[in-house]
Image: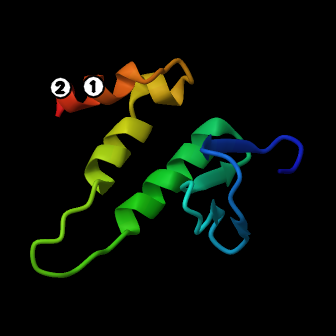
């Protein structure tokens, strides 16, 4: 990670320079940006562009987007309780 660059997501994945989204890796993905809000915005854009087709295919992209865009996550003031909070707010 370069100086002054922010992450949104988990660590230890390989970077994909073209998208700014790291992965694939069985530990997940992370987004990079010049600051936390930019990294979160990049992650939200990527989630909105995620497309899965097929009969009876469900994804968690809507839940992930709600979680990442939550004010507590954006402010880095979240803990694991955010998951239940986002579920209740849905």
Which residue is found at the position 54% from the left and 55% from the top?
A: 28
Instruction: Tell me the tag on residue 84.
Output: 1
Q: Nearer the viewer, residue 64 or 5?
A: 64
Q: Secondary structure at mark 2?
A: helix
Residue occupying the far bottom of the picture: 54
- Comparing 31 with 80, the one in front is 80
Measure the alpha-carbon separation of dots 2 and 1: 6 Å
Q: Is residue 56 above or below residue 43?
A: below
Q: Residue at x 32, y 74 (%)?
A: 51
Q: Residue at x 37, y 20 (%)?
A: 81
- Residue 15 location, quadrant: bottom right
Q: Quadrant of residue 87?
A: top left
Q: Position of residue 52 (x, y in %)?
A: 28, 75
The percent position of residue 88, horizontal first and vertical second, equals 17, 25
Report helix, strand or loop for mark 1.
helix
Q: Is residue 32 left or right of residue 77?
A: right
Residue 75 image point, x, y percent:
54, 23
Would residue 78 be found to the left or right of residue 82 on screen? right
In this view, 3 is above or below 16: above
Q: Which residue is mark 2?
A: 88
Give neighbour class at mark 2: few <14, some 14-19, many 20+ (Cα, 10 Å): few
Q: Left or right of 62: which side holds 42?
A: right
Total number of numbered labels?
2
């Amino acid at each position: 990670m370069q100086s002054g660059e922010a992450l949104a997501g988990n660590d230890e994945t390989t970077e994909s320079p073209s998208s700014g989204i790291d992965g694939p890796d069985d530990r997940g993905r992370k987004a990079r940006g010049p600051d936390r809000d930019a990294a979160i915005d990049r992650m939200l854009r990527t989630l909105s562009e995620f497309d899965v087709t097929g009969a009876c295919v469900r994804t968690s992209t809507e839940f992930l987007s709600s979680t990442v865009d939550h004010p507590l996550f954006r402010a880095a003031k979240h803990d694991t309780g955010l998951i239940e909070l986002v579920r209740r707010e849905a």
